[in-house]
Image (spheres, rainbow, N blue to C red):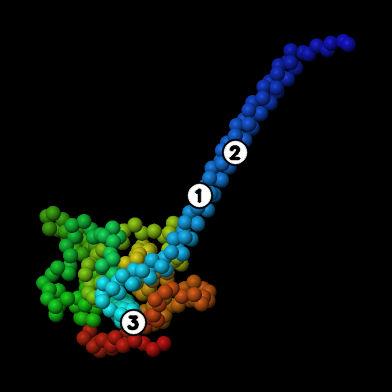
Amino acid sequence: MPIKLLRRTTYFRLLDAARERDKLREEREAYEDSIRALQCQVDELRDALADAERSRADTEAGIPGLVERRVEERILEMSVSRRRFEQLAEDRAQLVELYIEKLTSLACRFALESVETQHNRGLLVLLVDARNMDPGHFSDFHEGQAEYLDHDEFRGIDRQPHIFSPNAYNVFEYMGGKELRLSDEGDVLGYEERDGALIVDLCGIIVRTRQMVEGVRSYKVYSKVERLMDGSARHSAAIYGSSLDEVLVAIAVSEETNHVTVFRDGRFVQAYDPHGDRIISRADYFGESSSEQPSRVLPMTPPRRHVANDLDVDLDAVES
């Protein structure tokens, strides 16, 4: 059989093609090894997730029993009957709702006066169970700031800024004001907003001003808060703050729109528009009807507008 000789160029072209084929084969094998390794990792992660879900399910199944045992221990510590304990718990819940209604009324008054005086003022109020307060959740807004409540006007039982006393609204007004900024030589540099939150404890007393809510997280990274349709950094701090275990409610007043917004358990409850004197429900806010409601929700009723002077203010709730 005659032997056909290849031209030099043809031989090198075929040789290059063979080498390219071997290279592609090696790359394919490397990719396949990588895919198998990734698949092993996926399987391991899937198994770990299944174990975590089973552990969570077991933990959640045991929570009612743990709660019941803790309640029984607490009843024994208090030396009361279960019926009396339940009455005390109900009394506490009613007191919390009363505080929330009052704080909402004060915030609505603050917003109405901002509209009437044409001043843009923002506000954030948190009702907190101080006994369970995590010190890592809050801090002074400015390092070294002086606490406004340490002034003499708030000293003594008759002067404490309880939310049912006139002094409480004085603190609201203070938070709506501006801080004068001076140079080292005493020259006026400008004005600074008094940012941060008011902290109200379960005695109904404002205990801290200008507090920062630490570690604010949004719905994008934190499943305990829902997505806001609008709002500022203050609203983000409010909805995140309301999701914390020690916070029972967060109320934000927008500096831009004067709207009063109530958040509970990381969710929007409702808002008040002082310009139209109307309540904005969840359905209005999200543009859809929803029968689901956040826990511990009480209808919000804004105060009536005052018609005489600053000392003649009707804080009775407006009937819807």
Q: Hey, what amino acid is under mark 1?
A: Ala
How many other residues sit within 10 Å of disc 2, few (<14), some (14-19) or many (≥20)?
few
Label 2 to label 1, Cα distance in Å? 18 Å
- The residue under label 3 is 83
Q: Is residue 215 above or below residue 74?
A: above
Taking the spot 28% from the left edge, 61% from the top edge, the residue there is 134
Residue drawn at point x = 39 percent, y = 80 percent: 298
Q: Which residue is mark 1?
A: 48
> Can you tell which of label 3 and label 1 is closer to the viewer?
3
Mark 3 and mark 1: Cα distance apart in space: 44 Å
Can you identify the residue that label 2 sits on?
Answer: 36
Which of the 4 image quadrants contains residue 145? bottom left
The quarter in which the N terminus is drawn is top right
x, y percent for residue 186: 12, 58
* Closer to us: 33 or 197: 33
Residue at (50, 57) in percent of width and height: 54
Q: Is residue 133 visible?
A: yes
